[in-house]
Amino acid sequence: MNNKTKTVAGTAIVLAMLLAGAAEAAADQEDAAKLGHELTPFGAEKAGNKDGTIPAWDGGLTHALIPGTGTLPADQYPNEKPLVVIDQKNVAQYADRLSEGQRALIAKYPDYHLAVYPSHRTFAAPQWVYDNDLKNAAAGQLADNGQSVKGVYGGTPFPIPKSGLELYWNHALRYVSPSNNYKIANFTGNSDGSVTMTVSAIDNHQSPYYTPDGSAGAWTGEYALGRLQNVGPAFKAGEMLVIRDSIDAATPRQAWQYLVGQRRVRRAPTVGYDTPDFVASGANYFDEVFGFWGAPDRYDWNLVGKQEIYVPYNENAFFQTPADQALTAHHPNADKLRWELHRVWVVELSLANGKRHVVPKKRIYFDEDSYAALMTDGYDAEGKLWRTSYMLPLDVADAGYVYYDSTIVHNLQAGTYSAIEVFNDGYYKNVNPRPDSFFTGDALASEGVR
């Protein structure tokens, strides 16, 4: 090939690349134009499914249908009855709409079942969040090989997700109220059928990413600040934990712990990944909390596609149930849980090159509307299903959004489960933002009294 031929060929390659890039950009612009029309403002399919079992999104639930009378939002659909109850007798009929984890729980426990109710697409956010969704669709990008993001603020980072990592960031930066305070408890369901409360705590959460008057330029990159103070049982009362999560791939999480016995604050660098969760007495791993909690770098994230599947949804009735009735032997009280048919994004995780994790493979089901990781299945080194978890959404309709926090994690091989940050017997409320200094190790040191 002479120099002239090489030049022509090189020009053709560059031109082809430019045309491909232009076509991709045009496609992205075309997709972004669908937001608020064929797609919801946050990128979900606005229409229902063909047979009407999944309804169209009509703006979500932005006000309480029934006034709350206690410390938690009321059950919004108290008069609804299950459409079907899926158990060992009929599980084969519904297998294609069940995760492997749910099929395994039904097979393992004869009294476990799914009470399936009419579907309600209750997820909603304020208009300023939807406005930011549009901005993010145009400016949002993955950074640091997908381990961070840039150009986003105050909304779904990738309203039209094209990869597993984009869905991860949609989950990590999902909409929450800017500042809230709540009382929760963690429980462990033991293999002998007993249930033990491992901790009762007051939790404070703040989301600098969702400050209404903020901007991408002014945002520091920290997206979640948490401060947990144990109030029980007696031997744990007074312990405190502060966590600050950031999109900075070099320092994604900072954590400090106040230990009563030592009467001092120490850094807690192991709060993450597959470290046993000491808040739950080690019954689950830290990154199993909230569906998936922490940095994504130990896995490759493969986007499989969408699926219609039964997921936990609108769980206010469960949280209205006293804990000793809601959390029963081997699993939460199946009669109190509500399952609905929804569309989800399915992402499969496998170990990244050179990384290690005790759960080398996972499959995560991300809610189409909220992008919360509603269900996760975890597999052992032999590819056998080992763990399965699901989140229980609390519909804070009077504030116009859904809070995704409470998580159930089953160890199928050990026959145990963790109930993490459940609101039963607790409370939830939105509060004015606290100063940044409230979420620091120094603050724990100044307030430690035992």
Image (tube, grey):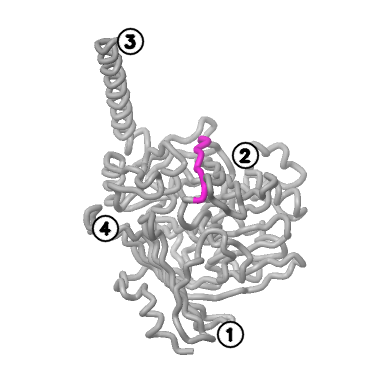
Say if mark 1 contacts mark 4, CB within 8 Å: no
Of discs 3 and 4, which sits in the foreground? Answer: 3
**Which residue bears the numbered disc 4?**
219
Say if mark 3 contacts mark 4, CB within 8 Å: no
**Does the stretch in magenta take in 266?**
no
**Which residue bears the numbered disc 2?**
97
Of discs 2 and 1, which sits in the foreground? Answer: 1
Residue 59 placement: quadrant: top left
Say if mark 2 contacts mark 3, CB within 8 Å: no
Q: Earlier in the sequence, mark 2 or mark 1?
A: 2
- The spot of residue 30 in percent (x, y) is 30, 29
Residue 1, label in figure: 3
Q: What is the spatial separation of the Cα atoms under label 3 and label 1, in whole angstroms?
A: 81 Å
- The spot of residue 219 in percent (x, y) is 26, 58
Of discs 1 and 4, which sits in the foreground? Answer: 4
Badge 1 amino acid? Ala
Assign the magenta stretch its main secondary structure: strand
Nearer to me, 206 or 427: 206
Depicted 139 relative to depicted 129: above or below? above
**Which residue bears the numbered disc 1?**
234
**Does the stretch in magenta take in 301?**
yes
Badge 3 amino acid? Met
Please give the range of residues in magenta.
298-306
Q: Earlier in the sequence, mark 2 or mark 3?
A: 3
Nearer to me, 395 or 8: 8
Q: What is the spatial separation of the Cα atoms under label 1 and label 4, in whole angstroms?
A: 40 Å
- The spot of residue 35 in percent (x, y) is 33, 37
